Image (tube, helix red, strand yellow):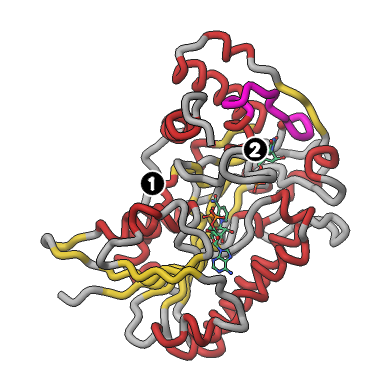
Amino acid sequence: MSRKRVIVVGVGGFIGSHLLERLLAAEVDGEPVYDVLGFDTSTSKIEGLLDHPRLKFTKTYVDASNVEEVIGPHLDGCYALFSLAAVCNPAEYVANPVFTIESNFIDSYKLVELCAKKKVWMLHTSTCEVYGRTIASYLDGNQYDDPELYEQREDQTPHLMGPTVNQRWCYAAAKALLERYIYATHTDRGLPFTIIRPYNWFGPRMDYIPGRDGEGTPRVMACFMKALLDKEPIQLVDGGTATRTVTYIDDSVDALMRMLERPEQAQNTFFNIGNRQSEVTMAELASTMVEIYAEITGDPEVRNHPIRHVTGEEFYGPGYEDCDKRVPTVARAEELLDWHPNNDLRQTLRKTMVYFHENYGAAKPA
Ligand code: NAD
Ligand code: UDP
């Protein structure tokens, strides 16, 4: 069996690094299945794999101006291309909205055209954030008792983003436009595609810990983890009432691998990939992480870890608006991919936090 060439743009990121491990490890009858061509500006999460004989890595920023030259020559005979590269951190949407839009739409649209020209299967990580806020959140009394008003279905749920002046939505709007561009290119020019909408995938190597291996405000798991590691108050935005469904990275990458193995089922459709059993408010996420960290460190004092309440504006700046609730239906992934997440919330947090404790704990500064 000849090996399949897979291109991963954004291979050095959190998801890319886990996907890379799985692609290089995949075997059928003892034979490796994939050769990987990876592109990213960053290598810190994949250092241990850079010398792998079936990885060819190019350190570069891929955008509309160079994509033809950088990616184009590799598309003939390519089995699939994962497009993962993006700015995807809410602090950036408010602080750097132009860059967020450039990264999530302008940098990527030419890649769509190239894949269409060469008929290469493009698997693109969009986001669950394209759904925006729930219908329930706009109704009197919120009406969260009716799942019809908040559950997110791939082809039925409308995209309800807030006003343009609330810049938080520039990411979701750019992602939604790229989704529409991909879908239009499919219907017009026969691009084979899969759109993936991740729901808060957590795990080792997610983001960075500010002051240790990065600067700024990462996503919530790393923010809470930094507070625990550095014994600073956990900052809870707007009362911590917003919910997320937390999905372990191994389960998530399992879905991506199943897509690759089942092209007939996975092509030309959209998938929510999230663990609907792991819905949690951000206040519950904070208290559960505190509890688990007390277990990991064996220090009962951690249970008294301080929480500081802040407004979205104080924490992120003007223009922040939150997604109120994110619960996917995953019937499509269950049916077409036979995919089921195996890790519940506590397992996900424990595995993730053990990694951060071991790699960034007090004994191990920067
Ligand atoms: P990440 O920030 O860890 O990884 C993104 C990687 O892309 C980084 O290594 C970055 O250096 C690289 N990159 C960015 N722009 C690039 C460019 N122009 N050229 C080359 N490399 C570039 O983020 P992640 O969590 O791995 O997310 C990957 C994708 O999944 C993103 O498109 C994101 O929007 C989407 N997503 C992720 C989640 C999640 O839960 N992790 C949720 C929703 C959507
Ligand atoms: N959040 C918080 N404290 C933090 C960081 C984030 O309360 O230190 C909240 C944020 O307001 C949102 C949720 O956590 O309600 C998830 O934020 P994240 O940055 O992970 O991004 P999102 O899930 O919105 O893409």
Please tell me whether residue 234 belongs to the stretch shown in magenta: yes
Q: Nearer the viewer, mark 1 or mark 2?
A: 1
Crowd around label 1: few <14 · some 14–19 · many ≥20 (10 Å): many
The residue depicted at 67 percent of the width and 76 percent of the height is 106
Under circle 2, the secondary element is: strand
Q: State the extent of the magenta-drawn residues as a range.
A: 227-239
Relative horizontal placement of residue 83, taking residue 308 as reference (left or right):
left
Relative horizontal placement of residue 289, taking residue 332 as reference (left or right):
right
The residue depicted at 85 percent of the width and 41 percent of the height is 313
Residues at marks 1 and 2 touching, judged by CB atoms closer than 8 Å: no
Please tell me whether residue 13 belongs to the stretch shown in magenta: no
273 and 125: which is toward the camera: 125
Tell me if residue 80 can be seen. Answer: yes
| Mark 1 vs 2, N-terminal side | 2
Under circle 1, the secondary element is: helix
Ligand 2's image quarter is: top right
Crowd around label 2: few <14 · some 14–19 · many ≥20 (10 Å): many
The residue depicted at 55 percent of the width and 85 percent of the height is 113
Residue 243: percent from the left, percent from the top?
A: 65, 38
The residue depicted at 81 percent of the width and 56 percent of the height is 162
Quadrant hosting residue 310:
top right
Distance Cα–Cα, label 1 vs label 2: 22 Å
Mark 1: amino acid: Asp
Residue where numbered disc 2 is placed: 243
304 and 185: which is toward the camera: 304
Quadrant hosting residue 327:
top right
Q: Is residue 247 above or below residue 101?
A: above
Q: Is residue 348 above or below residue 338?
A: above
Quadrant hosting residue 232:
top right
Q: Is residue 181 above or below residue 206?
A: below
Residue where numbered disc 1 is placed: 250
